[in-house]
Image (spheres, helix red, strand yellow):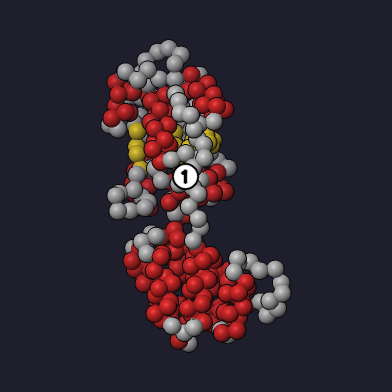
Amino acid sequence: MFDDKRIPPKTKETVTLRACRRRLPQSILLTGADERLREKCATELCMAALCEAPGNKPYCGKCPGCIRVKAGTHPDMVVLKPEKDKKSVSVKEVRERVTGDLYAAPTEGEVRIFVFHAAENLSDVIQNALLKTVEEPPGHTMFIFLCDQREHLLETVLSRVTEFYLGASPDGVKKDMAPAIAADIAKAMCGDSAYALMLACAPMQKNRRLMRRTAQELILLSRDALAADLSIEPLAGDREAAVRLHARFSAGQLLKLKAAMETVIGFADANANENLLLTRFTSLLEEIMST
Ligand SMILES: [Zn+2]
């Protein structure tokens, strides 16, 4: 179990010991490594929880329970995986398949397991909706979250799960593009160019999380720009962009920018369509430029 060179020995040891004793935590977070290894480990955890063979191994790999977990057809395993063209499952799906169906008894095994793939893309709304459940899950349920980096989950969720770290994550080293995009947007706005604004926004296409992050960054920039005395400690990374915004826009416009970005974050969390979200993002910024 958890037999991969990338997995730290301590993780392997803890998981195996707990699985042998049939004492796996009810809410588990698998972080690090790559997506494929996270999925493999999640399958092993499900087998350990749903194996029907007696004995003191974590799982047998041969009983009907193990075979159905491997085939992805076990009725007590609820897998939440984004559709091919989506980054995340929807709030609706989480309501229907998880929070609304939490108390259904397992049909074959002793537990029902909810497996969340790509947890790094779960919106704050979904994470918040799951909080209470993850904190006090019904006795016969288990939760497994698969996530590239723990930083992508809310603090409140992190404090309620047992994390098993699977090793350095190649997915996780992706650079945060938001500060650079926010600075480009600020520059385009100060230059009064709708075309430059469109170009600056383009990298966020079909990327809700990046739109959300960039909106957060623009809120920080607007707050920095609002500070009349620019010598105070800046909140955002790009000091020059804040100075530019300060010189170009009135306090009223900067407050509007802040409010507009809060609106964008609200839409992003409500899972608004990504194309509409980007259109809304740019049109709100254009409005501020033209006032
Ligand atoms: Zn088995």
87 vs 240, left or right, is left
Residue ranking furthest to the top: 55
Judging from the image, what secondary structure is the residue with disc 1 in? loop
Residue at 63% x, 66% y is 235
Q: Is residue 144 above or below residue 254?
A: above
Query: Residue drawn at (33%, 53%), measured in percent from left and top?
Result: 86
Above or below — where is 228 with respect to 48? Answer: below
Q: Position of residue 84 (x, y in %)?
A: 29, 49
In this view, 250 is above or below 118: below
Above/below status of 122 relative to 111: below
Foreground residue among 240 and 70: 240
Q: Outermost residue, bottom direction? A: 291
Q: How many marks?
A: 1
Q: Residue at x 34, y 33 (%)?
A: 77
- Give whichever of 267, 140 is nearer the camera: 267
Question: Is residue 278 toward the left or the right of residue 255 in the image?
Answer: left
Quadrant in which the N terminus appears: top left
For the question of whether residue 9 can be seen, the reply is: yes
Residue type at numbered disc 1: Pro
Read off the residue under disc 1.
170
> Is residue 130 visible in the rendered structure shown here?
no
